[in-house]
Image: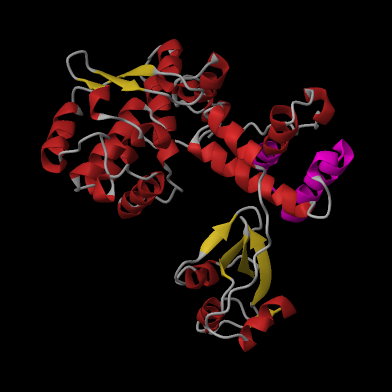
Amino acid sequence: MPAGQHIKLKKLYHRGAHHIGIYFDYDAELVSRIKTLDGIRFSRTNRCWYLPFTKKSLTAIKSLSIPYTLDHSVSVLENKTKNFRPKQPEVQVPASYKKLLYQKRYSDNTIKIYLSYFRDFIAHFHDKNIDDISKEEINAYILKLIKEKRISISQQNQRINAIKFYYEKVLGRPKTYYDIERPRKEKKLPNVLSKEEVKRILDKAKNKKHKAILALLYSCGLRRSEIINLHITDIDSSRMLLKVRGAKGKKDRYVQLSASLLPLLREYYKEYKPEVYLFNGQNKKQYSASSILKLIKKYAKQAGIQKNVTPHMLRHSFATHHLEQGTDLRYIQQWLGHSSSKTTEIYTHVSENAFHKFKNPIDDIL
């Protein structure tokens, strides 16, 4: 840790609750020490690590013996009792907003995001009737988040959608009333793994359930939400197909089932005996998306892979590897469930074939 490095502790309001925000200039050693705190989490929105706003959290931070400064809002914890809990602001989302989200059958994740972001919106305009807030005020609110919170383009769009849902869907106002200017979307290329890296990850997964999950994610190009919603009956071994039901956009699709994967799935089934969902978590409940993230990071680390590996990276790798072995782009589009071929065409930019068929001019020089 560099000499003079210290952390700043500030009160943070995030996702409907108060926290202790831990701010500092990035340092790998400092990050590793902060991550040892029980219950520590990172907020991309606020660009800081945080813990619940309690005396216990403050004591835990101090136990790290890292030089710190704290503002007045956090220092009050030093004089509070152990059971102190700050008074939470009463922020209620209109029942009609929540009801309509469910009626329109938005995904659980979308509902969670919309409610969280709209709750932030209401809290910001706590002294006003939200029905009377002008377009200019909304634009100013979004601009404030961009400048002060440095929210991403994706989050900016999600927050705008959450706000527009209330005024356009709940109140029934015309779309032009809150026609908020959207940012230009960043054109980022997907991160992919090589076949050898995928093999190393699968080889480290000795647990049959974990290996079956990761192998199915990769071999079928599935999203996390899709694999945890799979039912046993979605596997059609006679036709060697996997049915993905109610995926993104409420669309069903069929994906090719690998012949080499079927024996692993059968071994997993005999050992774990799932009843409804193909993959169960504790107490036979649906397997969680967060558990899948944890297990792939665990095995990627064990395999010595330095990349920031995520479940979605297996989906990207599936598409890229198919393209590299000559699979028609139209089939890849159908398997991934893309509505437009333009979405699938992004994989042509990361395929090795796109680079290796050309000779580099420097080869004639060096």
Give above or below for 347 relative to 28.
Answer: above
Q: Is residue 150 visible?
A: no
Q: Residue at x 50, y 33 (%)?
A: 107
Where residue 302 sits in the image (x, y, percent)? 30, 54
Residue 99 as seen in the image, left or right of residue 323: right
Q: Residue at x 35, y 37 (%)?
A: 228
Residue 337 lies within the magenta run? no
Q: Residue at x 18, y 19 (%)?
A: 237
**Colouring scheme, one of rainbow, by chain, secondary structure, one colour:** secondary structure
Q: Nearer the viewer, residue 222 or 75?
A: 75
In this view, the residue farthest toward the front is 95
Give above or below for 246 relative to 48.
Answer: above
Predominant secondary structure in magenta? helix
Name the image quarter holding residue 91.
Answer: bottom right
Name the image quarter holding residue 315.
Answer: top left
Q: Nearer the viewer, residue 100 or 252?
A: 100
The image shows a total of numbered marks equal to 0
> In the rendered structure, which segment of residues is drawn in magenta?
130-159
Where residue 338 sits in the image (x, y, percent)? 50, 19
Residue 162 as seen in the image, left or right of residue 214: right
Quadrant (top left, top right, bottom left, bottom right) of the N terminus: bottom right
Where residue 159 sits in the image (x, y, percent)? 69, 41
Q: Is residue 144 visible?
A: yes
Residue 155 lies within the magenta run? yes
Where residue 336 sits in the image (x, y, percent)? 43, 22
Residue 211 as seen in the image, left or right of residue 169: left
Q: Nearer the viewer, residue 66 or 196?
A: 66
Q: Residue at x 24, y 24 (%)?
A: 233
